[in-house]
Amino acid sequence: MVSKESEQFLTELRFYLMSKGKNDNEINEITEELEVHLMEAEADGKDVSHIIGDSPKQYMKSIGESMTTDYRQMAGLVPLMILMLGAYVSIGPAIEGNFSLSKGTLWIAIIAGVIAVGAYSVLIFRVLPKFLHSKWSAVLLLGTGVAVTGILVMVLLWNQKQGFEPVFTATPFQNNVIVAVCAVIFIVSAIYTKTWFTIIIPLFISMGPIANRFIPQDVNEDPTYILYTVIAFVIIAAIMIFVFMVKRKKMLNNGGKRNV
Amino acid sequence: MSDTTQMLKGILDGCLLAIIKEGEIYGYELAAKLESYGFRSLSEGTIYPLLLRMQKEGLISATLRKSTAGPKRKYYTLTEKGEQELVMFIGRWEQVSSSVDNVLNKRGI
């Protein structure tokens, strides 16, 4: 069992090495070895700074320098991100059962894709590791989910107004296939990055479309139902955050190894 | 502190080889031993990048063993190449240390 501070360092190290394109097996080896060291050192009453020195960044760099860069693996990361973004954008319409492509949509997708790959890599490799072990992680995840959904809805609404001619409209069967493919992409990326947020964020995104598909249309026009929904949503969110906190506390107490 | 680290570059490699030669050892123990020999200003983590590199160069080899404390420990042993490197290091060190001694004692040329 390592302290929160050490765990934070190990997470940051893992993401740092991943962003530098280091070999996965080597990353696992070095982080596990350091975890053992930190655990024993802390049991002896030593502080993290005693092990990694005054500058964690400098230390991470020195580890990175003695590891080989796996270019083949790094090449795989870019397509994975593009696939993931494609999946983010496609899963909503596909769940609702009206996935279609038009020339305009394709252009938006390409431009948004390029911008998003950049923003996304910054988020995954630089921003999220810093927050993952703080109490803000749940808020950040929730916020990201809401923001992503909001932006997507705006883009989709704008897109509908343009009245682009669809060049491909999915059949109900194809829609289900697209949903399945998206789910596979999210799961693969979760395994690959050894994190949960590639699954959690899509879950937030999917909530609206799932409700849209299974709740009858006239419900949408009744304000009482909307009020009930908002209340239900707030309660569910509160329960989820609570469960998340309790689980985390329990894991910290049990000394179990936690997935980030 | 960082000045010492800079100065120790290369020397530390040899020290690690010498300690590992005494018998199979894992990271934490190695750091503790190093400290007990007087390398107190060194942060313990410094050894891991070095171990990683020496492993890659084939000077040491590692095996994972279960421990009572929890997760598996990585134990290091010297390879034949490592033994040779250690002999060469000792030769180089004797040369360097006697030269430095000479300079500092103003007995040199």
Image (cartoon, rainbow, N blue to C red):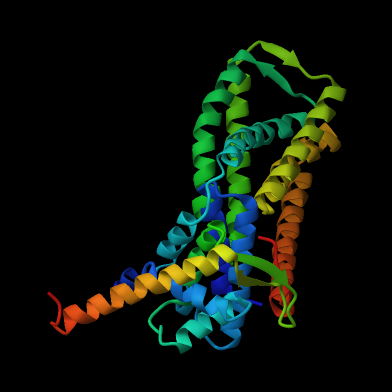
Residue A197 percent location from the top left of the image = 66, 51
B48 or A223: nearer the eye?
A: B48
As drawn, A37 above or below A69 = below
Which quadrant, please, contains the N terminus of chain B?
bottom left
Residue at 71%, 67% (x, y): give it: A242
B6 or A81: nearer the eye?
A: B6
Res A250 → quadrant: bottom right
Residue B41 percent location from the top left of the image = 38, 81
* Residue B49 located left or right of residue A227: left
Q: How many numbered circles does the render carry? A: 0
Residue A19 appears in view: yes
Residue at 52%, 46% (x, y): give it: A69
A255 or A53: nearer the eye?
A: A53
As drawn, A2 above or below A198 = below
As drawn, A202 above or below A171 = below
As drawn, A9 above or below A183 = below
Residue at 65%, 60% (x, y): give it: A260
Res B76 → quadrant: bottom right
Residue A100 percent location from the top left of the image = 72, 20
Residue A95 appears in view: no
Residue at 53%, 43% (x, y): give it: A121
Which quadrant, please, contains the C terminus of chain B?
bottom left
Residue B37 percent location from the top left of the image = 44, 87
A200 or A257: nearer the eye?
A: A257
